[in-house]
Amino acid sequence: MIDAIERQYELQPAPPRVVGPGRREQAYLDKIARLERREQEAAGAAERLARELAWAERVERGTQRRVERIEADFERVREAAAKSEEAQKRLLLALGALQRDNEYLRQQVAALGAGATPKLGSGRTRQSPDSVPKPLWKRLLGL
């Protein structure tokens, strides 16, 4: 009896339906996209840091050159001030010698006005050859 009722079934394929990636595949694709964004951001940050480092190096070199120029200028000014100070000292010595000579000449004029006979020479007592005063031009030039 089973033979008599043989049923025939025909399988027909179901209509195809559009199926996207599964949850795992979607998570994997999202992770890859995030990592690619991070890589791009890291590359951008590295480029920015490289530019900043280059600028910092330029600024440092420029600053170092500026400091060296300022130090050289300061050294020149200091040397000029020292020379000026020496020149001022020589000038003060020369002025002192001129003042001494003027005092001597005033004494001579006063003596002539009083009718006294002036002494010949500078009026200075000579004690030793080392104490002989230098001529004015040698004192002015520092010789």
Image (spheres, grey):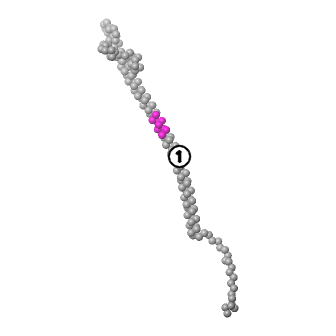
Q: Is residue 109 above or below residue 78?
A: above
Tell whether position 68 is magenta.
Answer: yes
Residue type, label 1:
Ala
Q: Which residue is rendered at x = 50% and y = 41% of the image?
A: 61
Q: Is residue 103 visible?
A: no
In the rendered view, does 35 fall on the left or right side of 116? right
List x then y, in percent, for residue 67.
46, 38
Q: Which residue is rendered at x = 54% and y = 58% of the image?
A: 38
Q: Is residue 106 above or below residue 8?
A: above
In the rendered view, does 68 fall on the left or right side of 44? left
Q: Which residue is rendered at x = 34% and y = 10% of the image?
A: 121
Q: Is residue 37 above or below residue 11?
A: above
Classify residue 120 by image quadrant.
top left
Quarter containing the C terminus: top left
Q: Is residue 61 visible?
A: yes
List x then y, in percent, for residue 17.
65, 73
Within-10-Å neighbours for mark 1: few <14, some 14–19, many 20+ = few
Tell whether position 67 is magenta.
Answer: yes
Q: Which residue is rendered at x = 30% and y = 7% of the image?
A: 116
Residue at the limit of the structure toward the front, as seen here: 3
Highlighted magenta segment, given as a residue range: 64-72
Quarter containing the N terminus: bottom right
- Main secondary structure along the magenta-highlighted residues: helix
Local SS, label 1: helix
Q: Which residue is mark 1?
A: 54
Classify residue 94 by image quadrant.
top left
How many numbered marks have been drawn onto this rendered protein structure? 1
List x then y, in percent, for residue 11.
68, 81
